[in-house]
Amino acid sequence: MNPVPRRSFLAAAGLGVLAGVAGCAPGTHRPVVATYLTTSYDDLYPGVEMFLGRARELGGFDFDVFPSGQLLGAEELVPGMLHGVADVVLQTSSYVSSSFPILGSLELPFTTEDFDRYLRACDPDSEVSRLINQGLIGQNMRMLGGMATGFEYLWTIDKPIRTPEDVRGLRLRVAGEIEGETVKALGGAPVFLGSAELYQALERGTIDGMMSYLGTVVSRDLQEILRYGTAAHFGAYTVDAYCRNDWYEALAPRQRHALDEAGRVLFRDGTAKLVDVHEHEYLPAVRDAGVELIELDEARLRPFRDAVSAVHERWRALLGDPAAAHRALQLIRDA
């Protein structure tokens, strides 16, 4: 039984573009690819194009591609895919890890503060990714590969965050439930908003700041408003290519191989492009705008780690498989 709610994605079924798409078997229509990402994400969208290019090259796919939420909105992508509206979706794990909790293993705060180790854990050929797919396949979903977006920082307007006490009472925007639990564990109030609403929410004082990776800040010009960023591993997520496992298994071997290779390109080349854009464009833009980036030493990090330990416990309970939870976190720390 599929545990993912239909939510509002059913409204998309009225679009004429869906005629003949939902419910079709592989090979009877052009595969549909959907993402909510826009071309304004200079760090992420090139990886999407790399993924599609590799799949076309090796598998002969002739995709119908719907970016920028043209077919399905951010929260509708995976439910829509599982109900046959799209065949492949590119989505951030933070939107779906509450329904697929094994994905949360790569989102938890302070599992590792070594980004290179985190990257090795995200590799589609890693033991971590294999364990994640074992969990997803039981829900008829497969992760083909994904980009690691970098660690999520805490960004604020009026005051810097140097201790957990500084978070108390702040309204911080989050994009997923694990992020929300992290903010609550630190004493803040999580606010769920789409990234398109952030500039106005910050400008009006509806929120005091946000938890996000660097790309959200620059792609939405939020460095014009934000004044502080506390740089630590408060969270993380990946931008993954997902498909239904039954759809994948029904493809010809050449096409399955092409999608697997495309997933590796998304991870390897897409992440490399993202890191390059962050280092040479986004970080300079943030610094040039006068945002103060606060680095925490080991002594200052320890209270944050202690505070968010409850987030790890809640994730273990949500997963409901203590052995898998322990193995996933150990594999990430040993990657």
Image (tube, rainbow, N blue to C red):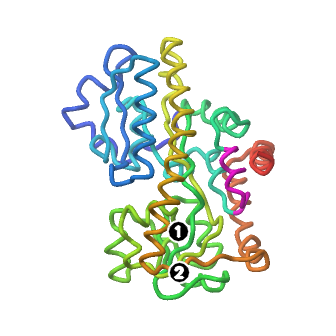
The residue lying at 34 percent from left, 48 percent from top is: 73
In the picture, which quadrant includes the N terminus? top right
Is residue 113 on the magenta stretch?
Answer: yes
Which residue in the structure is indicated by mark 2? 292
What span is colored magenta in the figure?
110-121
CA gap between label 2 and label 1 equals 15 Å
* Disc 1, SS: strand
Residue that protrudes farthest toward the left in the picture:
16
In percent of width and height, residue 252 lies at 49, 11
Q: Which mark is residue 159?
A: none
* Residue 147 lies in quadrant: top right
**Which three-letter amino acid code belongs to the residue tagged 1?**
Met
Looking at the picture, how far across and down is residue 63, in whole percent? Answer: 33, 26
Q: Residue at the spot x=36%, y=69% of the render?
A: 221
- In the picture provided, is 286 more to the left or to the right than 123? left
Residue for badge 1: 211
Q: Is residue 18 left or right of residue 118?
A: left
Against 158, is 155 above or below? above
Q: Is residue 293 magenta?
A: no
Q: Specify the farthest residue to the bottom.
A: 158
Numbered disc 2: secondary structure: strand
Determine crowd level at label 1: few under 14, some 14-19, many 20+ residues with C-alpha closer than 10 A.
Answer: many
Which residue is at the front of the view, 80 or 241?
Answer: 241
Give neighbour class at mark 2: few <14, some 14-19, many 20+ (Cα, 10 Å).
some
Residue 279 lies, in percent from the top left, at 53, 60
